[in-house]
Image: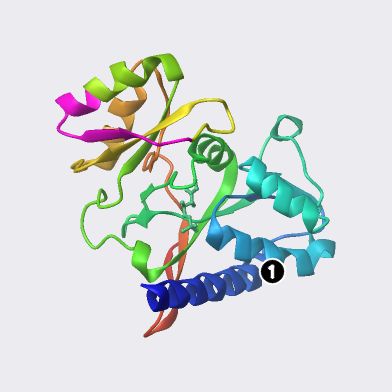
Amino acid sequence: MVSFMKKQNELKKMVAVEAMSFVKNIISKKNIIGVGTGSTVDYFIEELSHFKENFLGAVASSKRTELLLSKHGIKLFDLNELTELEVYIDGADEVDYSLSMIKGGGGALTREKIIASVSKEFICIADESKLAENNLGKFPLPVEVIPMATSVVSRFFMDLGGSPILRKNFVTDNGNYILDIHNFKIENSVDMEKNINNIPGVVTCGLFAIRGADKLIMATSRSGIKYFGK
Ligand code: 5RP
């Protein structure tokens, strides 16, 4: 387990370095970059900090990312000041070949989905363990819920065959709870995302299929870096 984690962290770092060398060729000094959340993105932020003069600043998808960006002296922007972003870089918990994803393992799914919606290009960075060969759903689906709706929403998922578990001792940056839906079969991810979005009390679900990634940069132990998508 320890050596798997070590290997995985090496791959996360590898993909972060590659993503930076890709991103630095598509950004200009007037661009503001969308930055996601998670350990892979933490490595990316470190890379980004070496190229501060190449872009104007960043919009963060979480308080955790805000802190790290500030620590590195990267200027933060409020999304309300902007209409669109050139590029958004974020990790995933699971990603399939159509570049639909499950996200929200770090609980930042709502802000991530908002930033993704205004970004011209969404680049997902991941190590090979995140690739879903078939349907998404091995990783329990995170769903952000309004606290008073926790039971109502749980019952909806139980009726759909899932096993919701309330994430312990966790409150999102927006003051809400996360239900992690285990044993949940996801066949048509776009329709499923639309259906979940319609459940009263759901703020955001961690399925990113309606707006998936445009590009996946993936680090593999056998074949190095692989690019998928546009
Ligand atoms: C956070 C996310 C992350 O992108 C996802 O959890 C992957 O994290 P990591 O890079 O630590 O494996 O969706 O809400």
Q: Is residue 107 left or right of residue 174?
A: left
Mark 1: amino acid:
Glu
| Place of residue 70 in the rendered image (x, y in percent of width and height, measured from the top left) | 79, 51
Q: Quadrant of the N terminus?
A: bottom left
Q: Residue at x 45, y 20 (%)?
A: 146
Which residue is farthest front?
169
Q: Residue at x 53, y 33 (%)?
A: 172
| Residue 159 forms part of the magenta stretch | yes
Residue position for label 1: 47
Residue 35: in sight, yes or no? yes
- Picture quarter containing residue 187? top left
Which region is colored magenta?
156-169
Q: Residue at x 37, y 70 (%)?
A: 128
- Picture quarter containing residue 95? bottom left
| Place of residue 38 in the rendered image (x, y in percent of width and height, measured from the top left) | 54, 54
The answer to whether residue 73 is above or below residue 10 is above
